[in-house]
Amino acid sequence: MTEYAAVVIAGGGPTGLMLAGELTLAGVDVSIVERRTSQDLDSSRAGGLYSRTIEVLDQRGIADRFLAEGQVMQVQGFAGIPLDISDFPTHHNYGLALWQREFERILAGWVDELAVPVLREREVTGFAQDDTGVDVALSDGRSLRAQYLVGCDGGRSVVRKAAGIEFAGWDPTTSWLIAEVEMEEQPEIGMRREGGGIGPVNREKGGGPYRVVLKETHLGHRSEPPMEELSKALVAAYGTDYGVHSPTWISRFTDMTRQAVSYREGRVLLSGDAAHVHPPHGGQGLNTGVQDAVNLGWKLAQVVTGVSPDSLLDTYHAERHPVGARVLKNTMAQVALINPDDRHEALRETMTELLGMDEPRKRFAAMLCALDVHYDLGEGHPLLGRRMPDLDLVTANGPLRVFTLLHNARPVLLNLGEPGGLDITPWADRVQLIDAKYVGTWELPVLGAVTAPTAVLIRPDGYVAWVGDLTQRGLADALTTWFGPPTVA
Ligand SMILES: Cc1cc2nc3c(=O)[nH]c(=O)nc-3n(C[C@H](O)[C@H](O)[C@H](O)COP(=O)(O)OP(=O)(O)OC[C@H]3O[C@@H](n4cnc5c(N)ncnc54)[C@H](O)[C@@H]3O)c2cc1C
C-alpha cells in the first residue's frame, strides 16, 4: 500500500524533528519515519545548546521551554580553553547545559503539538525517485510517495548511501570510551589534559551518577565496550576505578570526520549527522543539524507549495556545506590540540594565550556558537547574509522584538524609514511588511557596530536577504529570488 506525504523525513532525531516543525509551520504535510520505539535515548550524547540554536528556538517562540529545563552557563570552549561570550550582542549571550535526551523530549513535544505524524518502529530501507516524486520503501513492506525525501537518519544514513552520495573525509585516529555509571568513591571531577574526564550527570545537583569520557589507547574496536574495559581505563588514567558500578550505558566514539560531498541529489536531501560527522569537541553536532533544518525547512516548503522554483533548494547546499566544512576543520584542530605530549602542550599554551586576547576570543567563540555565520549573498551591507539581530522595536501597536515577528516562520520586510514608504503588494500574500522604529545601535558579533539600515528583508530562518539604504534598489530582485515571482494583480 502506498501512502502520500509532501515530504518524508527519515529519522526523528534532533534534525528530523526540527525540520518537521519548520515544514509544518509553513503549511506542508510531512511524515517522519523513525526506527526508535519512543523518543527515549539510551545515552546522553550532546551536552547542550549554543547561542545561535537558542536564538533560532527563540525565533519560533519555544526557547523558554528549553531554558526552563537546562542551566544557562558559559559553555563555549576551544579544545577545552574556555571562551566567554557574555559581552556578545545577543539576548542569549550564553549556552545552555541540557542533555540531548531532554532536548529531544522537549522538541518532540512541540512537534507533537503541531500534529506531525511519526511512523515509529520502522526504517527507511531505500527509495526510487522519478521526475514527479520519490517512492520511499519502509521496513514494514509499505511504501510512501512524497515530493521530497530528507535523510535526517544520522551518520550511518541509509538515505545518503542509497542516493550514492560520497561521504568524503578522514578515518578515525583516536577513540574514546563514554559511559554513565555510579561510583562508590568520590571521583576526581573535571577535564583531563588529553580531553575527557569525569562529571556529574546532574550538573546542578552534583554527585552520582557520573558521565565518564576516557581516551582509549588504541583504535579498531568493533563491539560495545564491556564494564571491565571501563574499569581498566579508569585505573590507567586515575590509578583507581573509584569502585565503578551500575552502568546505565557504555559506548565509544571516535574522531572520524566526514561530510557528504553533496547535500542534494534530485528530490533527496541530507541534513544533520547524515550530512556531516565529526568528533564532539566544541559541542557542535546537534546544533549544526538544527541549523541545517532551519535553513532547509522554509526553502523546501516554498518549493513544495509552488511558491519558488526547485532551484531554490540548491542554495541549501551552497549555504550549509561551507558551514559544515568549517565545523569539521575546527573539530580536527581541537582533537590535534589536546594531544597530551609536551609539544602539543606548548602549542596549547600558545593558543590559550592567544584566545585570552579579545579579538581572537570573539572570532573563535562566534565560530563555535554559529553567531558569525555569513551566507554568501553577494556584496553589500555587512548585515547581508548574516543573522538578523533581535532588536527591540517600536511599532504603532507598541514595543515588539524582531524574533517575535518570526514565530510563524514567514519572511518579514522591516521598514525602519518613513512609515508606508515601501510597497510590496505583489508579494503581500507571502511577506509581512512591518513599519517600525529602532533607536539603538546596530551591533553584530565580531564585527561590532554597523551602519543603521533603513529597511531589512528577513528570511524565515532569520538571515538577512536584502538591506535598504533609503531606496528600494534591488528589493524586487531579492523578493523574487527568495520568495518567488510577483503575483500579477
Ligand atoms: C559523545 C557525544 C557527545 C556529543 N556532544 C555534543 C554536544 O555537546 N553538542 C552537540 O551539538 N552535539 C553533540 N554530539 C553530536 C550529536 O549527538 C549529533 O550531532 C546529533 O544527535 C545529530 O542529530 P541528527 O538528528 O542529525 O542524527 P541522530 O541523532 O543520529 O538521529 C538520527 C535518527 O534517525 C533514526 N534512524 C536512523 N536510521 C534510520 C532509518 N533508516 N529509518 C528511520 N529512522 C532511522 C535514528 O533512530 C535516530 O533517531 C555528541 C555526540 C556524541 C556521540
Image (tube, rainbow, N blue to C red):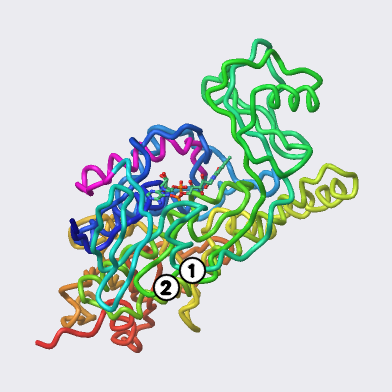
Which residue lies most toward the top here? 184
- Residue at 35 percent across and 80 percent down: it is 311
Q: Which residue is mark 2?
A: 265
Residue 118 within the segment the image draws in magenta: yes
- Residue 472 point in image, percent of width and height: 31, 86
Does residue 394 appear to the left or right of 447 in the view shown? left
Label 1 close to label 2 by CB (< 8 Å): yes
Mark 1 and mark 2 lie on one chain; the one further toward the N terminus is: 1
Instruction: Say if 64 sits above or below 286 in the image.
Output: above
Discs 1/2, front:
1
Res 231 quadrant in image: top right
Q: Label 1, secondary structure: give it.
A: loop
- Residue 115 point in image, percent of width and height: 19, 47
Foreground of the two, 241 or 475: 241
Res 132 quadrant in image: bottom left
Instruction: Say if 334 sits above or below 299 in the image.
Output: above
- Residue 60 point in image, percent of width and height: 31, 52
Q: Residue 164 got which mark?
A: 1
Which residue lies most toward the right here? 342
Q: Label 2, secondary structure: give it.
A: strand
- Residue 134 point in image, percent of width and height: 29, 68
